[in-house]
């Protein structure tokens, strides 16, 4: 008699746990996979069991998801001042349109995805502020050994912003461009075979007048991605910069062959390596 009772009790406990899990998924529908029954349930009854499930942090996240920012602020007021709470504050600030406060909170939280998204959007209209924010983000990630991949991306993006600042400020161009080169190399220290970082470092080295270093980066990129048209375009540029026109023409032909017909490319990729305003003229002289 005891065994059937225990079996029934186990079934009831499992059913209750399943119900709690389902309700929890429904209550925090922003974490549910779509399409799914929990997500559909959340759409129909977003407040289902929410007061009974989850701690204050989870309920604050759910309130932000639903646009109830006042409730979210009330809930996080009693939370410890740690990175997770900072991330919630950033989400509230972003929802209210306070970009500066949001970036500050995301940087403190180490939330690279949200911080980077806001910085990238800002770069279109205020590059100087975006550069300052990116420097803060990189500094926040500096000692986080578990964030190698995102830290590399943050360094690479910093290099791009520094390079852009150099184009816009001729008086400080060399300072910005040397800083950009250092940032790309920091990214490569974390991801030595990342093609994007290698190409950026190669181009920046050439812009800085260091053709041998540029050639090393582009050769590495070609080794990592043998069908990289951009790597061979870079090798053509470096050969031309060193007045080695035969090698420049060979690398240029390879780059053009790998890129395919212009009609199949998007507009940025359609530009021939000889048309690059900074490093194209030397290559063009080798082909005329």
Image (tube, grey):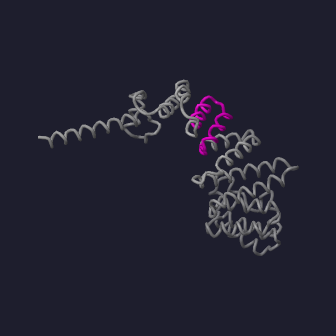
Looking at the rendering, in which quadrant would you find the N terminus?
top left
Query: Residue 83: x percent and y percent?
Result: 58, 40
* Residue situated in front as seen by the camera: 244 or 265: 244
In the image, taking residue 44 as reference, residue 81 lies left or right, namely right
Placement of 73 over or under 229, stated as above or below: above
Instruction: Identify the magenta region.
Output: 86-113
Residue at 82% of width from left, 47% of height from top?
Answer: 168
Residue at 57% of width from left, 53% of height from top?
Answer: 146
- Residue found at the very far bottom of the displayed protein: 246
- Residue found at the very far right of the displayed protein: 171
In the image, taking residue 18 as reference, residue 140 lies left or right, namely right
Circle count? 0
Residue at 66% of width from left, 66% of height from top?
Answer: 221
The quarter of the picture where residue 253 lies is bottom right
Placement of 110 over or under 73, stated as above or below: below
Query: Residue 50: x percent and y percent?
Result: 42, 29
The quarter of the picture where residue 249 lies is bottom right
Placement of 104 over or under 143, stated as above or below: above
Q: Is residue 94 magenta?
A: yes
Chief SS of the magenta region = helix
Query: Residue 91: x percent and y percent?
Result: 58, 34
Q: Is residue 156 magenta?
A: no
* Residue situated in front as seen by the camera: 135 or 37: 135
């Amino acid at each position: 008699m005891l065994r059937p009772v225990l079996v029934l009790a186990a079934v009831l406990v499992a059913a209750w746990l399943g119900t709690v899990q389902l309700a929890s998924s429904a209550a925090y529908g922003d974490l549910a996979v779509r399409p799914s029954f929990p997500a559909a349930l959340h759409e129909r009854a977003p407040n289902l069991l929410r007061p009974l499930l989850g701690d204050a942090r989870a309920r604050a996240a759910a309130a932000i998801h639903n646009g109830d920012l006042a409730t979210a602020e009330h809930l996080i007021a009693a939370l410890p001042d740690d990175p997770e709470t900072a991330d919630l504050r950033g989400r509230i600030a972003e929802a209210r349109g306070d970009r500066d406060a949001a970036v500050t909170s995301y940087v403190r939280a180490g939330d690279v995805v949200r911080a980077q998204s806001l910085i990238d959007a800002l770069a279109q209209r205020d590059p100087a502020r975006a550069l300052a924010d990116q420097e803060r983000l990189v500094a926040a990630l500096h000692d986080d050994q578990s964030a190698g991949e995102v830290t590399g991306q943050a360094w690479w993006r910093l290099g791009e912003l520094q390079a852009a600042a150099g184009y816009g400020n001729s008086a400080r161009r060399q300072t910005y461009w040397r800083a950009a080169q250092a940032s790309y190399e920091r990214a490569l220290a974390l991801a030595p075979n990342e093609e994007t970082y290698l190409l950026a470092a190669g181009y920046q080295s050439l812009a800085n007048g260091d053709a041998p270093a540029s050639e090393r980066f582009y050769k590495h990129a070609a080794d990592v991605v043998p069908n990289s048209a951009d790597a061979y375009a870079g090798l053509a540029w470096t050969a031309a910069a060193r007045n080695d026109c035969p090698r420049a023409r060979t690398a240029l032909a390879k780059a053009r062959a790998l890129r395919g017909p212009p009609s199949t490319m998007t507009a940025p990729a359609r530009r021939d390596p000889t048309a690059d305003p900074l490093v194209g003229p030397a290559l063009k002289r080798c082909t005329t």
